[in-house]
Image (cartoon, helix red, strand yellow):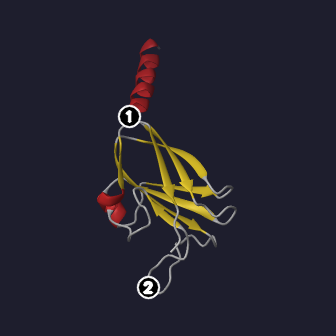
Amino acid sequence: MKKIILLFTLLLISSSAFSNEVKIKITNVKENQGKIVMSIHGSKESFKKHIPDKTLILQTTNDEIETTVNLPDGDFAFCLYQDLNNDDTLNSNAVGIPKEPFGFSNYNGKSAPGNFEKHKVTINQDEELVIKLFMM
C-alpha cells in the first residue's frame, strides 16, 4: 500500500512539474456578442493545417476576458476569433479579409498575420499573455 501511495504521489509531482499555468487576457472584445474561439497550436504543422492541439470556447461577458490553460514546456501559437453570429466559422469577405474580430499571439494588427514562427510563444514557466482582437 505504501508503494502505491508513493507511486501516486510521484505521478502527481511529475505531472505538475511539467505543466505551466498560462493566463490569457483577451482585450477589445465585443461584449455579449457571440463567443470567443481560441485554438492553441504546438507545432508548425498544427498551425499550417489548422488542426489545433487544444480549443477553448469562451463567453463574451465583458470587453476583456481572462482564462487559464495548463501547457507543457514548448512553443505555442494562440489564434482567436470572435464568432459574432455563432456559426462556428471566421466569416470573411470575398478577398479573405475577416468580417469578425480576430487575434493572434505576438500580433499587433499592423500587418497580415504570419506563420507559426511569427506567432509562437515559448512556454517554460507560468506565463501571462495579452491578446488583442482586431477588426479590419
Q: Which mark sits nearer the N-terminus, 1 or 2?
A: 1
Q: Are the residues tagged 1 and 2 within 8 Å (C-beta)?
A: no
At label 1, counting other C-alpha atoms closer than 10 Å, the crowd grade (few under 14, some 14-19, many 20 or more) is few
User: Looking at this rendering, what residue extends furthest in the top direction?
Assistant: 2
Residue underneath mark 1: 18
- Residue type, label 1: Phe
Q: Is mark 1 on a helix, strand or loop?
A: loop
Residue at x 54%, y 49% (from the top left corner): 25
Residue at x 41%, y 60% (from the top left corner): 107
Q: State the image coordinates of residue 31 (x, y, percent, origin top left).
A: 67, 61
Asked if residue 65 is positioned above or below residue 68 in the image, the reply reads below
Q: What element carries label 2?
A: loop
At label 2, counting other C-alpha atoms closer than 10 Å, the crowd grade (few under 14, some 14-19, many 20 or more) is few
Residue at x 35%, y 38% (from the top left corner): 124
Asked if residue 22 is positioned above or below residue 107 in the image, the reply reads above
Q: State the image coordinates of residue 43 (x, y, percent, origin top left).
A: 32, 55
User: Looking at this rendering, what residue extends furthest in the bottom direction?
Assistant: 94
The residues tagged by marks 1 and 2 sit, at their Cα atoms, a distance apart of: 43 Å
